[in-house]
Image: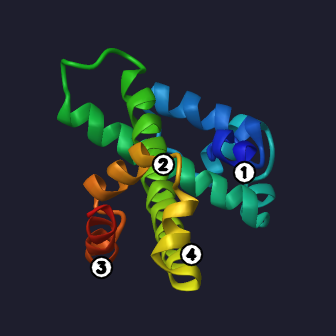
Amino acid sequence: MTAELNANPYDTPCPEIGNVCRDLIAAGRKISLRAVATELGVAHTTLSRDAAKRSQVLRCQELAKTVKRLANNNRGRLGEGESLLLAEAKRKISDLERQNAVLIASHQAMIMAVGELGGMRAWRRFFEDYQHILDYLEESGALGQKDGELTELDRG
């Protein structure tokens, strides 16, 4: 899973396509299958017939739109190349937010399953040495109302 998180979607499956697209963005040129193919020195059908490479170019086109939007919104405040970095950072933040939501949902399900299988006693044993985590889960609303009420009753 770590390799998947660290992989740059603009460089997968072909890093050369990612580099060409970044160069096109930096030059302010439009990203298209033909433009990328021309820069790579291959026929555009080489890219259009390969679903993975075509998808990679589409991702790079989305990146170019984000870069252009950021550059327009921050005209005069961003240096050259900063909008590309900002666009990539925004994509990474979005991915991490999505991953965080999945992790929260899976942990909520796990906590509920432990509670249902062994009741509150098993649930408290599961978090025996982790009171700070229980407090954090309550503060962030990850326990839900039903579980939060149970922990309050159990503390009393």
The residue identified by callout 2 is 96
Q: Is residue 142 left or right of residue 107?
A: left
SS at circle 3: helix
Precedes in sequence: disc 4 or disc 3: 4
Q: Which mark is residue 1?
A: 1
How many residues crowd around disc 4 within 10 Å: few (fewer than 14), some, or many (20 or more)? some
Q: Callout 2, which amino acid?
A: Leu
> Which residue is at a point 50% across and 80% down the rendered structure image?
119
Residue 80 location (% of width, % of height):
37, 16
Q: Is residue 10 left or right of residue 148?
A: right
How many residues crowd around disc 1 within 10 Å: few (fewer than 14), some, or many (20 or more)? few
Q: Which mark is residue 114?
A: 4
What is the total number of numbered labels drawn onto the structure image? 4
Q: Callout 3, which amino acid?
A: Lys
Q: Callout 1, which amino acid?
A: Met
Residue 1 location (% of width, % of height):
72, 51
CA gap between label 4 and label 1 equals 25 Å
> Which residue is at a point 36% across and 55% down the rendered structure image?
137
Tell me, yes or no, whether the two marked residues, 4 and 3, touch with CB atoms within 8 Å.
no
